[in-house]
Image (spheres, coloured by chain):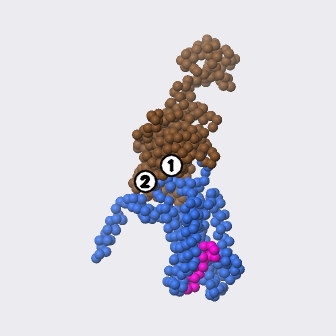
Amino acid sequence: MSAPGAGDGGGRMPDAVISLRDLRKRYGEKEAVRGVDLEVRRGEIFAFLGPNGAGKTTTVEILEGFRRASAGEVRVLGADPWAAPGRWRERIGVVLQESEPEPGLTARECLALYAGYYRAPRPVQETLELVGLAEQGEQRASALSGGQRRRLDVALALIGDPELIFLDEPTTGFDPAARRAAWEVIAGLRALGKTVFLTTHYMEEAERLADCIAVIADGRIVAQGTPQTLGDRQRQAAQISFILPPGTGPGDLPPALAERALDQGGGRVALSGASVARDLHALSGWALERGLELDDLEVRRPTLEDVYLKLTEGS
Amino acid sequence: MVLLPLFSYLLRRWCAPRASAAARGPLALVAHQVRYDLLASFRNPRARFFTFIFPVVLLVILAGVFGSGHTVILGVRVKLARFYVPGILAMSIIAAAYTNLVISLSALRAAGVLKRRRATPVSPAALVAGQALTTLVIALVMSAILLLLGGLAYGVGFSLGALAALACTVIVGTLATAAVGYLVAGLIANPDAAQPVVQLTTLPLYFISSVFIPEASLTPALRDIARVFPVERLADAFQRAALHGSFTAAVSPGDLLVLAIWGAAAATLAARRFSWMPSTAGG
């Protein structure tokens, strides 16, 4: 699957912040990344999804300049991350999947330490406020709650005022309230004009935040699109499902419906390939005629999670 | 009179809103790192115990209990207190620049802290220089504390020339030991292994290097083995300073050379071996 705008013979989009061409990474015999193409445009939130071991972390570490590609072309902010000079790092911010705070320092001191690493950092106080830690500035970073620590991680990535921010599973292990708070911070990054490269295991997170999603499985990009179009989601038919009234079987349904009915167990029946209005009409007419109730009737399109699970099946 | 404009210039500079450390140049950046590394060290209970409290306690116990006995070091008969002060001094350098450094580097790496620092524009050289200077400041402070304690409580005085020679040894010894620390931290993948590794590599050397046990009680073979390693060279150099009054007699070029060779070799190998990344399988 090719990236948008990549079909013109390798011409790069002018506003591409990240571009990968046939990226490969091998560890000994095993090829962890097997030809990945990606484009991330300026100002978008790009979600990178994939099961563990699919090559996601390797790809992210290559983009961050921590690992060297075995083959292929890698451009991040116009440079090859592996060979990029220290100045290049002025323009990126990294939130690692796992990192503990600087030991012994308060949240404010952590930010002041990192501010010193950049030539033109953001003000410390303003950055604390941006991630909602204005009240916790004087607390030891190690004494902050899990959610607060993660926000401090985001603050540390923002202190250099970067153009591009990598967020590697930023909300793993959060309770729902902390996750929502983190989403606000991430959505706020878009408002600041930042480009965000996000990896996550939570489909809801990708759906809420991302402008564009790519799914990697077994070292290859298996789908790319918006949350609405990923894996042709918008074109997939809705599904009607309900619980059969007591004393009836799938065979009792009108013949046009019965031939498409799938028994899902526990009395639940789903109609595949449904034309929603016509099938619902036929179904409710059938039930009214017999004086039956259709319990737990549902009409739904495949969720992003359904699409994702289908795409990554078997890997 | 000439001082006045200088003073007002410094005052203005001090009060002006300052550019970031990185913008002020590599030296300011190293000083910035030293400041926060020192802050973190002083707030770390483990570092406080191993680098500050433990050597003091050990000196109080050894010099307090056995200090009035006598032994022979480098051919000179001295009170045991004059043997223990340089020995514990050597031990405290190893504790700060090796034991503590290896354990904290391993922990920082496993916690992803080193990787996160490397994700910023700061150069590895600035981070390493900052850590080395921090260790040196700690070693100098610790030496001053031990020397004061030795002088005031146990009458082990040093002449100015001897103190100058001692300072040379502290500087060369700390930097060389820190280089070995970086090398060993680079070889340890699992942070849980750091503690046993540093104990196993230091404890036997303490016992054969005239740190706790006077050389008179050791066999020549053990002393020959010990002389290969930095611990004995540190202790030997400090003992020389404890015995002599003039700088030229108190300084120990042979020991400093061996320490410098250890440091240079370890730094060269560490530059290749040291990793900033936590050891996790690539996904």
Identify the image quadrant of residue B212: bottom right
Residue drawn at point x = 31 percent, y = 69 percent = B8
- Name the N-terminal-most of marks 2 and 1: 1
Identify the image quadrant of residue A243: top right
Residue ID for mark 1:
A64
Q: Which residues are magenta?
A: B227-244
Three-letter amino acid code at the position of disc 1? Glu
Q: Nearer the viewer, residue B30 or B155?
A: B30
User: Image height check: is B208 above or below A229?
Assistant: below
Q: Are marks 2 and 1 in contact (CB under 8 Å)?
A: no
Q: Nearer the viewer, residue B80 or A42?
A: A42
Q: Secondary structure at mark 2?
A: helix
User: How many numbered badges does the structure rendering display?
Assistant: 2
Where is residue A90 shown, x and y percent of the image?
A: 43, 52
B207 displayed left or right of A2: right
Q: On what subunit does the disc labeled 2 rest?
A: A
User: Image height check: is A222 above or below B30?
Assistant: above
Chain coloured brown here = A
Point out which mark residue A87 bears. Answer: 2
User: Image height check: is B76 above or below A50?
Assistant: below
Estimate how packed mark 2 is, as few (under 14), some (14 to 19) or many (20 or more) residues with alpha carbons within 10 Å: few
B245 displayed left or right of B206: left
Chain coloured blue here = B
Does the magenta segment cover residue A117? no
Q: On what subunit does the disc labeled 1 rest?
A: A
Residue furthest bottom in the image: B77
Q: Secondary structure at mark 1?
A: loop
